[in-house]
Amino acid sequence: MALIDLVIDEKMLMYASLSSYVRWDTQKSPHLVVSGVTGSGKTYLVKLIIGRISKYITDSQITICDFKGDNSDFSGLIGAKRYYRFDDALRGFNEFYDCFLHRQRYNDSMNFRLILIEEYASLLNYLPKSESEEIKRKLSSLLMLARSFNFHVLLSQQRLDAEYFGKARDNFNVVITLGNVSKEVRDMLFSSYKDEITPDRSRGTGYMITNGADFRRIVVPQINNMDLLNQYIKDAVDR
Ligand SMILES: Nc1ncnc2c1ncn2[C@@H]1O[C@H](COP(=O)(O)OP(=O)(O)OP(=O)(O)O)[C@@H](O)[C@H]1O
């Protein structure tokens, strides 16, 4: 079992003597989704998450499907083993899925494997319907079955509409929204916590709900050394 420091619990910042980090239990809560409007800090947070995975789970292997393909975010990964940019993202997803099936069939290794899909919804919209339906089906299967094989999914996208997930959205154990949320998102995800939803969320702040129950107002930690973080990410994408 691995525990990774994820984000800062805003409430805990008041108690300087206690750790304010929210720890992600990768076994209990295997899959994550990060959403928020453009510029809310999604890529910044997912980079932090995968960099930490690489640092603390030293045999972890990460696949990045960067449909967004914005050159500044993952530019150092061009040519890395499991980095798939823009329309190559579909190939990356399918290779990850095939590795999952291989592990299911042969149970030959159990190291931590994670796929990050940047702009999952845009990828689906880009593909012909038959291919996007195929991805949705495979994603559902990963979300439901991958935990016991130490396979994990991390999605980043602007909106969490049900149309992109089929019935699978509830299988994201950790849901993080950054920036202010719309009334629809509030009613959909945080209906039991309406009093804690305030219009003061800015870039790098938001809400997190774990396993449908553990709700927190959160702050994304600062990245102190981006070069080092990029190196950790590259290590896990290449190893
Ligand atoms: N917590 C943070 N602290 C400091 N800077 C941040 C933080 N979050 C994001 N930024 C900066 O804000 C800018 C936008 O962040 P980012 O690209 O992560 O947003 P995004 O939600 O992924 O946007 P888009 O959907 O347009 O890709 C970047 O320059 C990033 O470095």
Image (tube, rainbow, N blue to C red):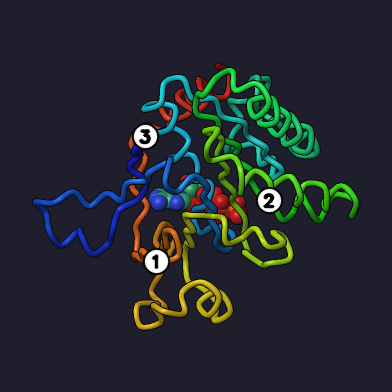
For residue 38, side relative to residue 216 (left or right) = right
**Discs 2, 1 touching: Cβ within 8 Å:** no
Residue 53 in percent (x, y) is at 43, 32
Residue 122 in percent (x, y) is at 74, 54
Q: Nearer the viewer, residue 176 or 153?
A: 153
- Alpha carbon distance from label 2 to label 1: 21 Å
Above or below residue 223? Residue 178 is: below
Indicate which disc, 2 or 3, sits on the residue closer to the N terminus. Answer: 3
What amino acid is labelled 2 in the image? Ser
**Discs 2, 3 touching: Cβ within 8 Å:** no
Residue displayed at 45% across by 65% down? 212
What amino acid is labelled 1 in the image? Ala
What amino acid is labelled 3 in the image? Ala
Q: Which residue is mark 1?
A: 213
- Alpha carbon distance from label 2 to label 3: 23 Å
Which element carries disc 1, helix, strand or loop? loop
Residue displayed at 77% across by 47% down? 135
Above or below residue 122? Residue 26 is: above
Q: Which residue is mark 2?
A: 140
Residue 84 in percent (x, y) is at 71, 31
Residue displayed at 34% across by 38% down? 3
Which element carries disc 3, helix, strand or loop? loop
**Discs 1, 3 touching: Cβ within 8 Å:** no
Q: Which residue is mark 3?
A: 2
Check disc 3: other Cα within 10 Å, few if <14, some if 14-19, many if 20+.
Answer: few
